Image: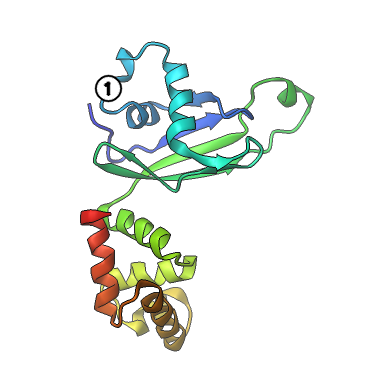
Amino acid sequence: MTPTTSAQGLLLLDCRLRPVAYNSAALRILTFPAEPEGIRQLSLFVTDKIRSSLLRGGSSDHPAFVPEYKSGRRSYGCRFFRLDCHGAESAKTSSPSFCVLLERLSSGEAALVCTARQFDLTTRECETVALLLEGLTSKEIATRMSISPNTVKAFLRLVMLKMDVSTRSGIVGKTVRQTQWG
């Protein structure tokens, strides 16, 4: 069984980054290529997988999760949210402290994530490149981002400098290459 394309993996973790709850999509993503039903001590397996594959350092108070997780040939965006659990009861129990969302990335999104990481692109630079990959002109990008065309051109020049290319098609070429070799 392969991970489904539409379902998002959802994990709730306690303050020690142990799973409190997870959905079946998260199990399929984390256990691939094995079947979740065939894994003994599934909770321990998921805990180990979180620590070995989803975390890239930090402390239990401020964990650093990876931005992308690979399961087989598929790439998933990994977003995490700190949950505020108030009250004395939540401090004593293993109530969730973090929510981790695993969302399937298209090959273009995966390439953009890799490109952003490799060339240290800002959020706005990534947004500009994403719209460029859609084939939009600077004027169309400016309209979508609610900025001036000159600002778009400035973002593209910064991206070109970071990526060591001299044209818009150079940006597209290096980004698309991430899909093949990234």
* Residue 130, image quadrant: bottom left
Q: Is residue 134 visible?
A: no
Seen at 31% across and 73% down, the residue is: 132
Q: Is residue 25 visible?
A: yes
* Residue 102, image quadrant: top left
Work out which residue is located at the far bottom of the displayed protein and give it.
Answer: 150
Q: Is residue 41 above or below residue 177?
A: above
The C terminus - image quarter:
bottom left
- Mark 1 lies on residue: 34
Work out which residue is located at the far front of the displayed protein and give it.
Answer: 164
The N terminus - image quarter:
top left
Seen at 29% across and 28% down, the residue is: 32
Q: Is residue 15 above or below residue 171?
A: above
Residue 118 rendering spot, x and y as whole percentages: 39, 60
At label 1, counting other C-alpha atoms closer than 10 Å, the crowd grade (few under 14, some 14-19, many 20 or more) is: few
Residue 8 rendering spot, x and y as whole percentages: 38, 38
Position of residue 85 in the picture relative to residue 18 (left or right): right
Q: Identify the coloring.
A: rainbow
Residue 154 rendering spot, x and y as whole percentages: 44, 84
Q: Is residue 65 above or below residue 21?
A: below
Seen at 24% across and 63% down, the residue is: 176
Give the secondary structure at mark 1: loop
